[in-house]
Amino acid sequence: MFPFRTPLALATLALLLAVAAVGSPRSPADKRPEHPVPEPYKQAPPHSFECRWADTPIVLDGLADEPAWALAQPISAFHVPWLGDKARMSRTATTAKLLWDREYIYFHADMEDSDLFADITEHDGGLWKNDVFELFLRPDAEKLGYYEFQVNAAGARFDAFYPKYDLDRLGAHAKAGTFGLEAKVKLRGTLNARDDADKGWSVEGRIPWGDFLRTGGRPVAGEKWKLNLCRFDYNADWAEPELSCVAPIAKKKIPPFFHQSDDYATLTFVGPTAATAKPYGIEAREPVASKVVGFPDPPPPFVATRILDKYRPEYPIRVEPIPGTPEALVITQPHAYGPTKVLRVPFGPGATDKDAVKQLDTPNGGTAYDIAFHPKFAENRYVYIGWNGAPTGQKKKSSVISRYTMTAKAPYELDPKSERTVIEWESDGHNGAAVCFGPDGMMYVTSGDGTADSDANLTGQRTDLLLAKVLRIDVDHPADGKMYGVPKDNPYVGRKEFAPETWAYGLRNPWRVTYDAKLNQLWVGQNGQDLWEQAYLVKKGENYGWSVMEGSHPFYPNRKAGPTPITKPTVEHHHSEARSLTGGVVYHGDKLPGLKGAYVYGDYSTGHIWAVKHTGEKIEWHKKIAITTLKITNFALDRDGELVVCHHAPVGEGGFYTLTPNTAKADTGFPKKLSESGLFASVKDHAMAPGVVPYSVNAPFWSDGLHKERFLAVPAGKISYKRAGGWDFPDGAVLVKSFALETREGDPASRTWIETRFMTRQGGEWYGYSYVWNDAGTDATLVDAAGLDREFTVRTATGAAKQSWHYPSRAECMVCHSRAANYVLGLCEVQMNKDHTYPNGRTDNQLRVLEHLGLLDVGWAGEAKDPSARQQPDQREPKPTGLLPAPPAGLKRLADPYDKTQPLAERAKAYLHVNCSSCHVEAGGGNAQMDLGYATAWDKMRLVDVKPVHQSFGLADARLVAPGAPERSVVLHRIAQRGPNTGQMPPLSSARVDRPGVELLTEWCKSLRK
């Protein structure tokens, strides 16, 4: 009758047909009258039920005696509805309950049973041959997928997902996939003793919402699913088992009729209520009348605007138009620092990802940096690629300029077999390999110092190597067995102490070179080391000082300088505004007339863009022209001479931008005083306005011992909650932090407010502002963009002492509140997962409060490890949710560094995270190789027993952290320093040593052993 194809299917069919036959009124073969067959009911039981919220933990023990269970809805509607006019309640009573929380759906069933029987212990076995409780869930009435979970009286489990009802595949689906069903059974009698009289059994279980990722995962409050709770009850004295359920299955349409999911009951998930949840620290979200809108300073003249919207390659590094065509070559990589490939793509508005055609992979998994076309490309078809990696047959890495030949007709193809090495030099870090041509046909090539940090090989001022230079070579007139010749007018030709290819020297890590023929200007952008980023208008023979100098500032002044004077950079930027400078191009296009003749460049880490116009002798003007969120790897000019900016980000996010005029204007209404911000009910009382939410953090940043209070205001929208890193906030959000100084040391009653800071997101960007309080403590005034310094007098036990305080500039605010830190430092799971006492006197977990206020947008679903457990096609999709991924107790939190009752190593890790990791993470701007984020394992931090690549400050046998030896630990030394030229860490925002912090790290260091 049914096309079963496997022995498993045949066995399933036999069982299902047997099951289909049972459920009729008591047979004369019944031996004892207990549990008689009920009379037909006059009114069908309800078939709409609630799954209520569990605000307190549930322990699986089969008892269901936690307070939450007392609030669950009893479900006793187990009946036999398919008997037509003889439909009745079940012979044995069953009361079930359902609860849910952020992680699980819980079930409990208490069953009357005078003959406990279960002899199957196999997982996913035929449990329906035993006394068994079943739970069916169909998440979406419009979609066909549904789940089956079973637990028998022996505690054996069955779990399955069915994409749709398919009799042929029920057995296969029952064995597929993994589930997290847990259950605990309690027996009131003796299992499998068929001749005694038992009382019953109960089962308490839970199913993780991760098991439901196949159909969109966890429900949201108010959502309705389809439900069937079922029971098989076997009794040796009955002729047949009793089947019952809560679904109104009026007719058996299929042999396994419990699978008739169209006939299931309705289950509503009820969210937290006053009855099911304890009181909250804040009961309701109130509107915020924030007036922190716009900008107090004139906005930059340009904004970044995406071009080629449909072509968004992953991590583009470089783009360059192919001369004489509408196409371009693009260098991309699958992830930062990954191997690269070169693609050809039509560079126009209609371009899509499918239009990109791979031309070549960088040899041996190397990284390509640059592209240049020969000035006579139309004739010789030569394309030059600058890259770094291990050339074929070599173990060590080198920087290489390779020449390829491109076909003359469409489709334009690079021939990998045409590769010829023009020039190469050994280099493993700070590699250069940027290339361009001058108007005289000469090729200019950059090289770095070849090391990772601090010019460890002392190549910066060496003149006899190809390293740390701008090289100038003639690729059209090769000589001496090389693929190039040395131009006779190079500045150091004939001097034995110089590599003859040298045009200029003393570079650290040049990133991008361009030659503007119209102005006869050669520009190089350079990544700095500790504090400064530079760009140079390169001139013949100049020495740019590395590593004696970092830009115009001493770096290792005692190192031997080269034989020629050191030239300062044309422009340089402190790390307060730039961390990884990307060299640019000179613009001569028509769309941005104000930039004609200006060198446009930017910064990878901050996304800021500047322009400088230079006469060749002096700077005509120099200014910041855009503030963006881009990770800028390249500036280029399209075939019309218009600006193109590469954004180095994952597929779908990365791609190409240009600059367009900014129509925003300075907002004269931006609050110049705290009393104008709309965030305070009373400034003099430091009382916040309705809707402004107070918060605190687990691990506070050291702020010279000042007392701090923190608040957040979200006038509209929601906070995008993330498990790792800082959260994302909507435009208009304001984070407030106020600082109070004890004017009598040790006396909290003497606290005086001296500064309040705002971090606010406006127009898709974060901005930082400081307000200085007046002496009367009645209001505070906006600090100028350049910042401010003040000195205060503090009475101590030994007399009056001076305490200096720095109000950060706008740029300095963004040093710590960087893109690498996602701008918000304390607003993250590990910092916010703590109890806070609110103004109403209630103490509550902060995450729970934000969840309750509806302020969070939680991307809950994540990714299932088992492919079969991932989102399935044509099933219910994930719903937007504000529920946390787990109860706060199950989420991560930082230790309090100053709480000695907490584990020492966790305290040390928290201290390093909060005080150091805003810089010392990937792309954070810290030049040491440490990664001090809390999520980084100790052995991955490159911290313990690692030699410093910068200064060792005179410490013998120095290490960043020397196990058991604080006196040899550079990190501890620097944290214990303050003042100019001491190497203090953190380098900003502190003039006093954190003595408890130093003691903590010293104790931790002593506890370490090799």
Image (spheres, helix red, strand yellow):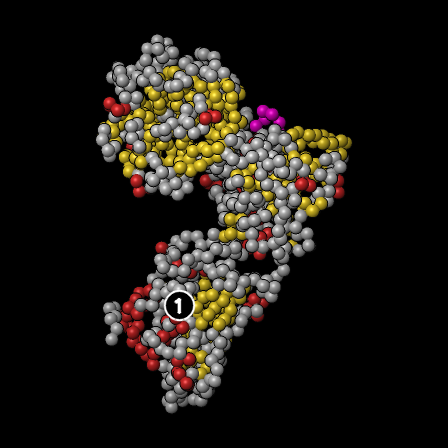
> What percent of the width, then of the height, locates residue 40?
45, 86
Q: Report if residue 210 is visible in the image.
A: no
> What percent of the width, then of the height, locates residue 937?
47, 43
Residue at the bottom extreme of this rendering:
28
Position of 158 relative to 516 (above/below): below
The foreground one among 781 and 145 is 781
Q: Is residue 744 left or right of residue 19?
A: right
The foreground one among 101 and 1010 is 101
Q: Which residue is mark 1?
A: 148
Q: Quadrant of residue 748?
A: top right
In the image, the segment drawn in magenta is 978-983
Q: Is residue 29 left or right of residue 892?
A: left
> What percent of the width, then of the height, locates residue 323?
30, 27
| Residue 979 highlighted magenta (yes or no) | yes
Q: Report if residue 659 is visible in the image.
A: yes
Q: Quadrant of the N terminus?
A: bottom left
Disc 1: CA contacts within 10 A as few (<14), some (14-19) or many (>=20): some
Q: Is residue 783 left or right of residue 163?
A: right
Q: Give the secondary structure at mark 1.
A: strand
Residue at the top extreme of this rendering:
494
Position of 74 relative to 920 (above/below): below
Q: Residue at 40% across / 34% down in the picture?
A: 646
Q: Is residue 292 left or right of residue 310?
A: right
Which kind of residue does numbered mark 1 sit on? Glu
Position of 740 relative to 481 (above/below): below
The foreground one among 943 and 49 is 49
| Residue 344 highlighted magenta (yes or no) | no
Q: Residue at 29% across / 28% down in the picture?
A: 324
